[in-house]
Image (cartoon, helix red, strand yellow):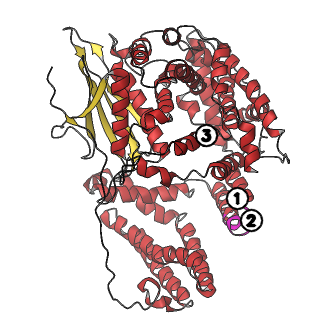
Amino acid sequence: MCLSFQTFWKPNGLPEQITFKIRGTTLYGLFGVPELSCPEGFQEAQERSLQETERLVQKACTTPPGKEIVMIFDQLSDALCRVADLADFVKIAHPDFAFREAAEEACRSIGTMVEKLNTDVDLCQSLRKLLADKGVMESLDPETRRVAELFMFDFEISGIHLDEEKVSYFHYKKGYWLSLLETKSLSQVREVAYKVFLYPNAQQLHCLEELLTSRNLLAQLVGYDTFAHRALQGTMAKTPGNANCEICQDKYRLCRLLQEISSTWEERRKLMPWDHPYHSGVLRAERYNIEPSLYCPFFSLGACMEGLNILFNKLLGISLYAEQTEKGEVWCEDVRKLAVVHEQEGLLGYIYCDFFQRPDKPYQDCHFTIRGGRLKENGEYQLPVVVLMLSLPHSTSSLPTLLTPGMMENLFHEMGHAMHSMLGRTRYQHVTGTRCSTDFAEVPSILMEYFANDYRVVNQFARHYKTGQPLPKHMVSRLCESKKVCAAADMQLQIFYAVLDQIYHGKHPLEKSTTEILKETQEKFYGLPYVPNTAWQLRFNHLVGYGAKYYSYLMSRAVASMVWKQCFVQDPFDRAMGERYRREMLAHGGGKEPMLMVQGMLQKRPSVEDFVDALVSDLDQDFETFFMDSE
């Protein structure tokens, strides 16, 4: 088979040198605003802004649906932002206290007006009429439609749809939040943010209870004791009992580890749930000084794609090639089509790379199966087609697309899903590639994270886009070590989530309310206390898409850890192990029992203890030193 593909992205070389010249224009106030030649000018500027706002609000409320409505709203926004944005900068950056004080007052004044407008029912209704008019909306250009929807979003996040009592509470809390930003400590701000975000909603609580009850009835209708029993059918865990056994063993091992760590602290002050993310971030920064901007120059998109190409070629005999698309084939001009080609078998499938940010594009990294592989009636194999969607920044005339370490790891993660789809060779598309049990589907993607964090792999491609210098080994080491800080506490939080999910989808009717169950489970499995008058379960969106299966993240990570340590840690480019990985784990999709695939790869059937050992062994064994050194 002769293939005439062009090679894929290449790392950019030196950026162009661009020179900017400043014109000799006389400015009569800050940023050319005449009034702002003195601090008192802020008062004049804000008064004129508010007068214009009143006029535009009246106009918006009396204008029929059409493009003009969006233009008026934009003019309204501009009238406020011309002062607010400028003042927001001046209040923190101007060397003259009088300017800073005047700008601060202008920010408060304009901010009050914005809050008023965002809950103005008549103003919102004028926009709602436009959005509801399908004919008019279809006549608008994409950018105008986009702007109209964003304005409506501003109304909605300000509680425009809530009843009067809830709106009052919302803005009471928001006002309290703003006052804290000005007068209280950061700890108190975090506390308020946590409590406001997790404030209970009676209607949502009812919906959650209805969802759980309906799922239980559905499961019992088809012969299962609980919804969890139904959901775990065909998975590695098989039953809720097995899933809970692993989760509980994880919990007790981690609790002992955390107790050993906490005993080294000179002062064991009480932590609250809102403290953990903040303090773990501070600890990472202080101990390792991991600044993403230091790493980005080594991770151009071209370099990272070349790294994946090298890895797949050495491990699996696979290369990635860019292929020219036909007119109308892609939905955006920056989408790239990759042909996945094996050195002997030829073309295996296609990956469409939708990597870059654009308006209306969801800000998430994910993998989509477009066409599954299957054996067709004529004996030919239907090649799989997938899309990888990322949210990377565009390159510029002077700078290639540079990835943070997290972006690079996500790219490897998603490419793990893609290779699972490409290398699946099942007879039936119903079980092709990632169409397998949830607790197995994440194994190939998580395994790729181990490759992404191994210096031997990173050293193959991480080069400074200007100088060509390789990423120093000590920087990779520090990055990897920083991820282990507070990793035990992070894992304990995941255990709490998994246990809660199992209880909610266990025996019904539930003995207590979902909030009471949350409180008991959090205090038993997490260690940090439940905060009264909060309902975290209403923000647990995985209950919808991953009902009774949240444990899958832990189990998949345990399997990936075992595969990495047993098969690839000695040599991440071991071709024999790569072939075994393809043959035993990737080729079958969901067409083979997942535990049998794991057994084939590891050459033994792992026990619950093996799963737990794998997770715990991933945590840094010198955890105690990290805490002591950072004090």
Image position of 515 with respect to 346: above or below: below
Counting residues from the N terminus, which is met first, the one under dot 2 or under dot 1?
Answer: 2
Q: Which residues, given as a range, are shown in magenta?
A: 178-185
Give the secondary structure at mark 1: helix
Residue at image mark 1: 189
Q: Which of the labelled discs sits on residue 481, or is there none?
A: 3
- In magenta segment, residue 368: no
**Most foreground residue, 449 or 218:** 449
Residue at the (49%, 12%) spot, across then down = 601
**Amino acid type of the residue that numbered disc 2 sits on in the rendered structure:** Lys
The quadrant in which residue 56 appears is bottom left
Where does the image place residue 15, in percent across and percent down from the top left?
A: 31, 59
Where does the image place residue 526, in percent across and percent down from the top left?
A: 74, 34
Where does the image place residue 600, in percent across and percent down from the top left?
A: 49, 8
Q: Which of the labelled discs sits on residue 281, or is there none?
A: none
Where does the image place residue 594, in percent across and percent down from the top left?
A: 50, 13
Residue at image mark 2: 184
